[in-house]
Image (cartoon, grey):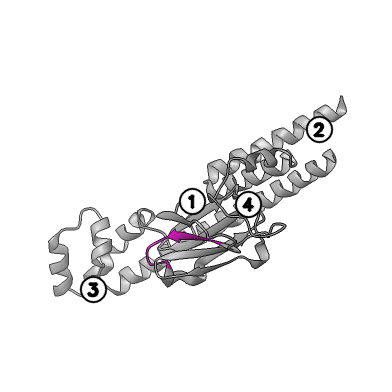
Amino acid sequence: MLQTHLKSMEELASAWNQQAASMKTAHEQEIKHLKDQQQAQAKSQPLTPAVSQQTNGLSTTTDSNSAEHPAAPAKASGPPPQKLPNAPTSSGVTTAYKDFESLMFLTDEYNSPTVTVYLELKNVGEFKDKVQCEFFVDRVDVKVLDINGVNYRRHITNLYKDIVPDESSFKVKKNRIELTLKKVKGEYSYETWNELCSKKRRDREKQRDPMNSIMELMQDMYEEGDDNTRKMIGEAMMKSRQGKNNGMDM
């Protein structure tokens, strides 16, 4: 059993390292692409107001000179690439998550087969293709990736009662995401949910394999953390694996 856990951790660590390397390469390629694009624009047309605000040392006389001498903007091809790293990067680069604006749980009626949850997020209806929702027996993981460079996430854990993942669903409205959680039917009827999450479920969580809980927690931290956090998680896993190997040798 222990060897199986160790092998799983090694495979997960390897996958995380590959993912981190891939994200770093994509980030570098994106920055290079933006620099090339900025240089091309600077040579072919005057600076836009947004870029002019980010570039130090440019005065109103620059605009007047540009009007009198069309070729003058080419002289500004140097500063914009230097200021480019301070400008907002395009989608897909950010890795951190923000929480949704609010969550609302509707107390269900007697013998209702479902539970409804609302996650409020302004204008989310314009980004339906970027909404991801995963249903599990005792939790729900909702993500909205890259709304103007920002990622949103709400991981709802320790649900009051178990749900049926395959029969649960979600809909994206104009300013919210509507979750419909399918209850597990009891012996005679569907139980009433007094709350969305319950502390009592943590007692049952303790009976599960603690290694699985640790791995899930580390995975969440890895997904939400920056490069330094991911590096620390990788080092912690390496030390843990080395410690267990030393214990087995004794």
Q: Nearer the viewer, mark 2 or mark 4?
A: 4
Indicate which disc, 3 or 2, sits on the residue closer to the N terminus: 3
Indicate which disc, 1 or 3, sits on the residue closer to the N terminus: 3
The magenta-colored residue range is: 115-124
Magenta stretch encompasses residue 167:
no
Determine the CA span between mark 1 and mark 3: 42 Å
Residue under pointer 2: 245
Residue 243 against residue 146 in the figure, above or below:
above
Determine the CA span between mark 2 and mark 4: 39 Å
Secondary structure of the residue carrying tag 3 is loop
Indicate which disc, 2 or 4, sits on the residue closer to the N terminus: 4
| Front in this rendered view, residue 112 or 132 | 112
Give me the residue at 37% from left, 58% from top.
Answer: 88
Q: Nearer the viewer, mark 1 or mark 2?
A: 1
The disc labelled 1 sits on which kind of residue? Ala
Q: Nearer the viewer, mark 1 or mark 3?
A: 1
Secondary structure of the residue carrying tag 1 is loop
For label 1, the crowd category at 10 Å Cα-Cα, with few meaning under 14, some 14 to 19 and many 20 or more, is some
Query: Residue 183: x percent and y percent?
Result: 63, 60
Q: Quadrant of the C terminus?
A: top right
Residue 76 against residue 19 in the figure, above or below:
below
Residue under pointer 3: 71
Residue under pointer 1: 96
One can see residue 167 in this view:
yes
Determine the CA span between mark 1 and mark 2: 34 Å
Relative side of 17 to 87, left or right: right
Rendered image quadrant of residue 68: bottom left
Give me the residue at 20% from left, 53% from top.
Answer: 57
Residue under pointer 4: 161
